Image (cartoon, grey):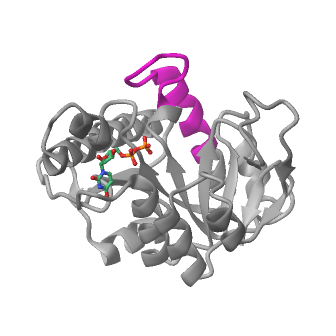
């Protein structure tokens, strides 16, 4: 594309669910490689990209707790699930020649780097994609909040939330065909109308730091680069 991207450095949040493809759990490697291709295109367009990967395709703390597990233990299992997804994305990205580093909020130094903000910054300046694993490292949080936190820490221009649909709708477009898609929303709209695009703590953190949230369809071919150049379909919360 001839035009310069609208964003210089972005954090892309990919939920565990997005990695499932048509499966009901786990990682679909073809879907992972499709997402990697989008990230590779963004890097090639000169955008610095970091990723936060969810874990819901493998384990969610709340479902463990609902079955009687200790909530904190279940949350740690959820965080470990995000590390598996991060390693899958790393290998998928490196297969197509994108340089990456995984940094975990829970140190596991034989597997990946521990999270060190200044080091992560340096990797990004060198054009490497940094994949942040293990969420915030704390139970009772989500990877949405981790994504907002890292986006603020890394000085990102936007938080990109890749979803299964092309933006924020007034109702679930899969069950409500007449639902309205928004091009633009205020942070407070999302919070007060409970639009459920990201959890409230993540939205609040982005509001306090004036970082826009860009909601787009992660499965749309070329979608990420199009949105980065301001020509794709998305909802911008800002
Ligand atoms: N989790 C946590 N602290 C964090 C991030 C995640 O305890 O900072 C746990 C939590 O149990 C959560 C699981 O990890 O259910 C997987 O993350 P999440 O549900 O956010 O993944 P996604 O919905 O994006 O796939």
Where is residue 21, by image quadrant?
A: top right
Query: Can you say whether 55 is above or below 5 in the image?
Result: above
Which quadrant: the C terminus?
A: bottom right
Q: Is 130 positioned to the left or the right of 34 in the image?
A: left
Residue drawn at x 53%, y 34% is 18
Q: Position of residue 142 (x, y in %)?
A: 38, 54
Where is residue 7, by image quadrant?
A: bottom right
Q: Position of residue 84 (x, y in %)?
A: 28, 37
Residue drawn at x 39%, y 66% is 123
Q: Is residue 90 magenta?
A: no
Front-most of 134 and 227?
A: 134
The reply to whether residue 137 is in sight is yes
Q: How many marks?
A: 0
Q: Position of residue 220 (x, y in %)?
A: 73, 34
Front-most of 183 and 71?
A: 71
Q: Is 87 positioned to the left or the right of 100 in the image?
A: left
Q: Which residues are magenta?
A: 19-40
Front-most of 41 and 22?
A: 22
Query: Can you say whether 202 is above or below 163 in the image?
Result: below
Q: Position of residue 80 (x, y in %)?
A: 22, 43
Residue drawn at x 39%, y 31% is 57
The reply to whether residue 126 is in sight is no
State the residue lying farthest toward the top: 23
Q: Is residue 20 magenta?
A: yes
Query: Can you say whether 161 is above or below 184 in the image?
Result: above
Q: Is 140 positioned to the left or the right of 90 in the image?
A: left
Residue drawn at x 63%, y 62% is 47
């Amino acid at each position: 594309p001839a035009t310069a991207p609208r964003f210089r450095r972005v954090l892309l949040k990919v939920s565990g669910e997005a990695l499932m493809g048509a499966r009901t759990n786990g990682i679909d490697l073809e879907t992972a490689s499709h997402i990697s291709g989008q990230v590779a295109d963004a890097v090639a367009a000169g955008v610095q990209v970091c990723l936060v990967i969810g874990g819901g395709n493998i384990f969610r703390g709340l479902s463990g707790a609902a079955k009687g597990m200790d909530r904190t233990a279940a949350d740690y299992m959820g965080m470990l699930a995000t590390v598996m997804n991060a390693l899958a994305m790393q290998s998928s990205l490196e297969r197509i020649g994108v340089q990456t580093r995984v940094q975990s909020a829970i140190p596991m130094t034989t597997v990946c780097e521990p999270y060190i903000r200044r080091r992560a910054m340096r990797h990004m300046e060198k054009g490497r994609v940094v994949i942040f694993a293990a969420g915030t490292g704390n139970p009772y949080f989500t990877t949405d909040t981790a994504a907002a936190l890292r986006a603020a820490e890394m000085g990102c221009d936007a938080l990109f939330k890749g979803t299964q649909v092309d933006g924020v709708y007034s109702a679930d477009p899969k069950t409500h065909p007449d639902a309205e898609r928004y091009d633009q929303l205020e942070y407070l709209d999302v919070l007060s109308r409970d639009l459920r695009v990201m959890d409230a703590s993540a939205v609040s953190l982005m509001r306090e730091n004036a970082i826009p949230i860009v909601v787009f369809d992660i499965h749309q071919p070329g979608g990420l680069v199009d949105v980065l150049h301001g020509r794709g379909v998305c909802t911008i919360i800002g």
